[in-house]
Amino acid sequence: MLFTRLSTRLLTSGGAGPVAIRRGLSEITYKGQNLPFDITNHRLLAIKFTIFFGVPFAVPFILVRYQLKKAAGHYP
């Protein structure tokens, strides 16, 4: 009984939890600072997102079109 109280007290005290890193107040922060890509150039960001999401979305449609044309005899 004593061991269970002690173990629950240790686990709930936050000693085993993740450690937060504190930063100084003099650091300048901005939106998107913690992202792995640059968001300051909006046109380049739009192009990258279109390629990143558009190409995998289009691949199944391109493959189906190829298979249908191949079945119809348009491709040798």
Image: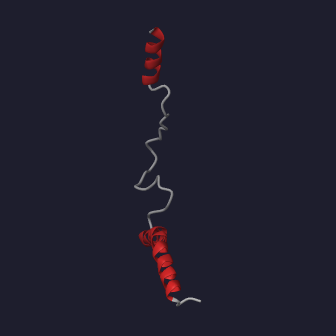
Q: Which of 56 and 21 is in front in this view?
A: 56
Q: What residue is drawn where x is 53% and y is 84%? A: 70
Q: Quadrant of residue 43?
A: bottom left
Tell me the quadrant of the picture where the N terminus can be found.
top left
Q: What residue is drawn where x is 45% and y is 76%? A: 61
Q: Give the image location of residue 29, x and y in percent.
A: 43, 51
Relative to 32, is 76 on the left or the right? Answer: right
Q: Which of 75 and 42 is in front in this view?
A: 75
Q: Which of 29 and 70 is in front in this view?
A: 70
**In the depicted structure, whether residue 48 falls above or below residue 18:** below
Residue at the farthest left position: 31
Q: What residue is drawn where x is 42% and y is 70%? A: 46
Q: Give the image location of residue 37, x and y in percent.
A: 50, 60
Q: Give the image location of residue 16, x and y in percent.
A: 50, 27
Tell me the quadrant of the picture where the C terminus can be found.
bottom right
Q: What residue is drawn where x is 52% and y is 90%? A: 74
Q: Give the image location of residue 56, x and y in percent.
A: 49, 69
The number of callouts visible is 0
**In the depicted structure, whether residue 73 falls above or below residue 2:** below
**In the depicted structure, whether residue 2 falls above or below residue 53:** above
Residue at the farthest top position: 2
Coloration of the structure image: secondary structure
